[in-house]
Amino acid sequence: PLDLDNIQGDILVGLLKKTETFYFFQISDDVNAFRTQLSQLAPLITSTTAAMDHRKTVSQSKKDALAQGREPPVVPIAGLNIAFSQSGLTKMGITGDIGDVGFKNGQLADALALGDQGSTVNGKFVPDWIPAFKNAIHGVMIFSGDKQASVDKTLAEVSAILRVGAHDATIHEVLKVVGAVRPENGHEHFGFLDGISNPAVEGFDIEKPGQGAVDPKVILTGHDAILRPAWATDGSFLAFRYLFQLVPEFNLFLKKNPLPTDSDGNRLTPEQGSELLGARMVGRWKSGAPVDLTPIVDDPVLGKDPMRNNDFHYNIENDFTSQSRCPFAAHTRKTNPRNDLRPEFVTPHRIIRRGVPFGPEVTPDEAQDNRTHLGRGLLFACYQSNLANGFQFVQKQWANARGFPPKSTPPGIDPIIGQLNPGDVLPRSMSGTNPASQDELLGLPIWVVPRGGEYFFSPSISALRDTFAL
Ligand code: N7H
């Protein structure tokens, strides 16, 4: 059985994050002082057990309120997780080969291969990232809560332990980014319901129809065959990406390229045609309803129903060759191709996503000029036991690869997150958006812009307390 008191809570359960602050830091040269303080920090880390309790508390208080005909109260809840980069482990003097090349090299070294934009400076590729991510980041603390005040309370406690701001501070802040659920609860900035599909972890989750289950070794380190130091058991690699979204530009594109007809050949109004184009690019309607199950009209009840909203496989009537229901390159199909491949070729590449949106709502001015003036997007975060199989694979071999999934008509690039693999000089495009002309390529401007990121290791709480702490 999994040691739920040992595994950090964001991995298998997810911290409750109405609001969530990612606090990226460097460790000062007084490494021993920092490591001594870690023993005070370790008890504040939210374990899997604690994260489960948080969820129970919130759902119980909702039930009670409903039964008594009251508004559900806001229950104060705060969570804290911590993860380190390779440079952070090295700085702390934690040696031992953790057995993951992507982690060891760090994300900056991977930016070119991920397809991030950038330029060559003195023979070296430098991505167009914000400066904070072009310097060493030793670690990240994730503060979550029901409201900013709950986050701020934990931040103050942790700052006191680590003497942040004082002359003997043992860390300093590189960057603090605040994410929060949008007023349209659970929907990301393009307007689509997110966080619907994550794999069930065997022995921990009860699998829902179509969800797909994975052995814990796909997500947790120390459960697979890779040789690692003992302290690396019950951890997980955290891939973080600072992704900006160009929302007015995305909306303008949909407006300018409405689909003339749906897959039954019915003529569509421009509004219907634009809505359907967006749904076919994502693989789900804004409500979350999968286009594979409901290709003609949105079905918000289906979108919300966890027993049905993952119960699809892209092979209705055993037809893998048609894009009538869902384009091959739709974002959800690229990143989890379900029955397009045999399970043994999909399961090792599943990841657990725990991202949160950041930035303000689109202003009337931005909507008016169809241009982004304010930074907004997704603090993308996902967990896996192996970066080369997880995030790196999904981005490079699936989203960015024009030939994936393998079909007689090349799918093209994931319209949401696909980038050009090195050597690919063609513009971004995909097939299959127009059900009446499925081989036609649609050119795709860029709407998701990576401005930074890092690969971290989220250690077990015992590793933090017994190995990392002095
Ligand atoms: Fe994606 N979006 O709003 O369009 N994603 N994603 N993602 N994503 C998903 O099924 C989005 C990104 C995955 O199992 C949904 O839960 C945006 C990266 C995976 O069927 C929506 C960004 C990577 C899935 C979005 C972004 C992934 C998934 C549907 C960036 C990995 C599950 C909701 C700003 C490299 C697929 C759901 C499945 C679903 C959007 C990033 C991967 C709406 C806007 C970088 C594995």
Image (spheres, helix red, strand yellow):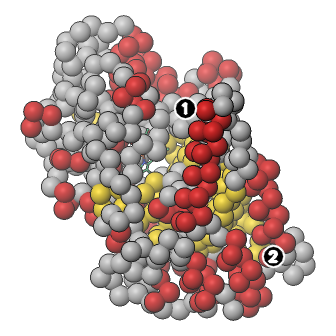
SS for tag 1? helix
Q: Residue at x 46, y 54 (%)?
A: 353
Q: Earlier in the sequence, mark 1 or mark 2?
A: 2
Residue type (three-letter) at the residue carrying disc 1: Val
Is 115 located above or below residue 348 in the figure?
A: above
Which quadrant holds the N terminus? bottom left
- Label 2 Cα crowd, 10 Å radius (few <14 / some 14-19 / many 20+): some
Q: CA distance from mark 1 to mark 2?
A: 40 Å
Looking at the rendered structure, the secondary structure element under dot 2 is helix
Q: Which is more toward the observer, 212 or 68? A: 68
Q: Which residue is mark 1?
A: 247
x 54%, y 73%: residue: 5
Work out whether residue 330 or residue 257 is closer to the camera in this orientation and state it.
330
Residue name at image x 18 percent, y 47 percent: 339
Judge left or right: residue 461 versus residue 160. Answer: left
Kind of residue indicated by mark 2: Ile
**Of the pair 117 and 203, the residue shown nearer to us:** 203
Cβ of mark 1 under 8 A from ligand 1: no
Quadrant in which ligand 1 is drawn: top left
Q: Is residue 432 left or right of residue 135?
A: left
Furthest toward the front, the residue is 68
Q: Residue at x 42, y 73 (%)?
A: 2
Which residue is under mark 2?
Answer: 161
Pinpoint residue 141: horizontal percent, then vertical percent. 66, 66
Where residue 25 appears, as percent x and y from the top left, is 70, 70
